Amino acid sequence: MALAKYFVRAATAASQILQGFDPKDFEDLLNDLVIGIAFDEQACATEGRASLDLLVRLVARLYPTICLLPSGEEAKKLAKNLASLARSINEDITIARRGSSALSHCLVVGSTNPEISCPKFFLGSDGWIAKFSPEEPVGTAGSNNAFGAGAAACIAASNLFRHIFRDQIPGATVDKAVTFSLFDYAPGSRANPPLSDTALDDLFLLGLGAIGNGAVWALSRVPHLQGHLQVVDGEQVDQGNLQRYVLALERDIGQSKVKLAWRYLKAQRNLTIDGHSARWQTLPIIRSMQHVAVALDTAADRIAVQGTLPRWTINSWTQRGDLGVSHHGFEGEMACLACLYIPNGTVPDEDQVIAEALGLEDRKIDIVRPMLHDGAPVSEELMRDIASRLTVPVEPLLQFVDQPLRNLYRGAICGGVVFELTAGSKPVRVEVPMAFQSAMAGIMLAGEIIKQAAGNAPDWTTAKLNLLRNIPSDIVTERRKKDRLGRCICQDEDYLDVYRAKYQAPEVGGFGKK
Ligand SMILES: [Zn+2]
């Protein structure tokens, strides 16, 4: 069996988006696939290498058998590195020899068009522009900008997934020719300025989860990044994280997420990096944060970040239906970060989601909410109650006794323990994105960081897309005004006074560079 040890997490994620999901069928189908990755000498330059690196980081987490098809001497050397990368992501992966088994699908990078009869997915890039076609090679350009290349890998991985599971994703089809600029996200845009030397102005990156991993992957590849970056996350990598953390290898399990990020970022010799292996809320330094990139999980966290009154924030998310990035100041008419996350009654709050997932709907107010608030540990008695409510044996859940309720939720529900115990028969309502979704959000976040640092702040608030659908041919950006009902802290004079005092001279529009 060559499926990754963390396969159950991938199955949990897939069960969220595939109709009529059956874990056994899902596993059998994956085991029958042989995913080829073909590339030539053109793909051995910076952009092509970036696409191939991320492609392997995405594909090796889910598919148990891959086959590398290099063409040319340099490509053959690169194939050795990619094979070893794939094995460090899933040590049980099968790397099939060319010609030993029929390919089911083939991803192609560069200008080559291998003579293979299976469906082919051509990806490539030109600076900020990601390219994809199911018909013909799209080529990789020779710039040192990896943003289009990384996005192309995510788009290709999403097309591969949509094609394989097309009968189980309503309305999903493979994209026709895609040209997608990460510079401005405008339909048909050819906007593609060269990357100049960029300096980060004491930027905080909060959260090194799946999106943070994608962001660090991209930031580590920006040429000559300078300035000061502070990365913050208090957690360690666990096995389930391997399902979609593009930076993480199997040997990283147990490693702090900050150290994992640092291993990649240290390639930026002119960038000063401070790592904080702590929950961001506990750091005294957050009071002075001015520039913040947000890759956190919850609405409550985002509202709290806005409450520290940064000069500006760049936010990123994955959620059911879309992924994206948003830009925020605090003054002016445009939405602050908190405006976007004020509970509006249609999105269930965290209390509700966790209460439902644990079968504790009737105990939401007296048990779930206080326990989430104060981080109280789960007693064995409560665990037995939860197991009986979920009709699963309690033994596999006992490992979560004495841990906070949120850990139980994330480990047992999101992590797939309950899913596995019920053989997938109990629908689990969780948000576990696919790897290509989180990576795309992270690359977009990094792109916004670099554009902002270079003085290219956008005039839109949000940019979003859904990788389970075709890449849109219309506008994906949107301007968002402040909360319609005037409920936000950015509409509160006391907060505004503190904000203005923090920055002395207020800025028109509340958004821009220092
Ligand atoms: Zn607001």
Image (cartoon, rainbow, N blue to C red):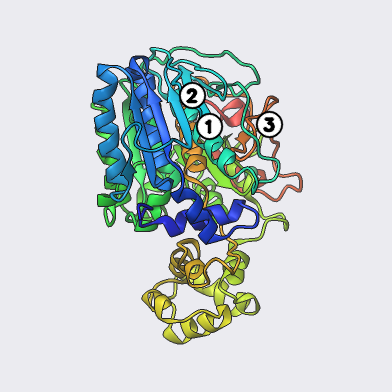
**Corner quadrant of residue 16:** bottom right
Kindly identify the residue that appears in the image at 76 percent across and 44 percent down.
484
Identify the mark nearer the N-term, 2 or 3: 2
Q: Which residue position is annotated with label 2?
A: 123
Q: Is mark 3 within 8 Å of ligand 1?
A: no
351 lies left or right of 450: right
Q: Which residue position is annotated with label 1?
A: 155
Q: Amino acid at mark 3?
A: Glu
Identify the mark nearer the N-term, 1 or 2: 2
Location of the N terminus (image quadrant): bottom left
Q: Residues within 10 Å of mark 1 (few under 14, many from 20)?
A: many
Q: Is mark 1 within 8 Å of ligand 1?
A: no
Q: CA distance from mark 2 to mark 3?
A: 27 Å
**Corner quadrant of residue 40:** top left
Q: Which residue position is annotated with label 3?
A: 478
Q: Amino acid at mark 1?
A: Ile
Q: Amino acid at mark 2?
A: Leu
Q: Secondary structure at mark 2?
A: strand
Q: Position of residue 226 (x, y in %)?
A: 31, 24
Which tag is nearer the camera, tag 3 or tag 1? 1
Q: Position of residue 513 (x, y in %)?
A: 49, 25
Q: Work out which residue is located at the far right of the displayed protein and give it.
A: 485
Kindly identify the residue that appears in the image at 44 percent across and 12 percent down.
194
Q: Position of residue 180 (x, y in %)?
A: 57, 22
Q: Let me know if residue 501 appears in the view.
A: no
Kindly identify the residue that appears in the image at 47 percent across and 49 percent down.
30
Q: Let me know if residue 105 appears in the view.
A: yes
Identify the mark nearer the N-term, 3 or 1: 1
Q: Secondary structure at mark 3?
A: strand
228 lies left or right of 123: left
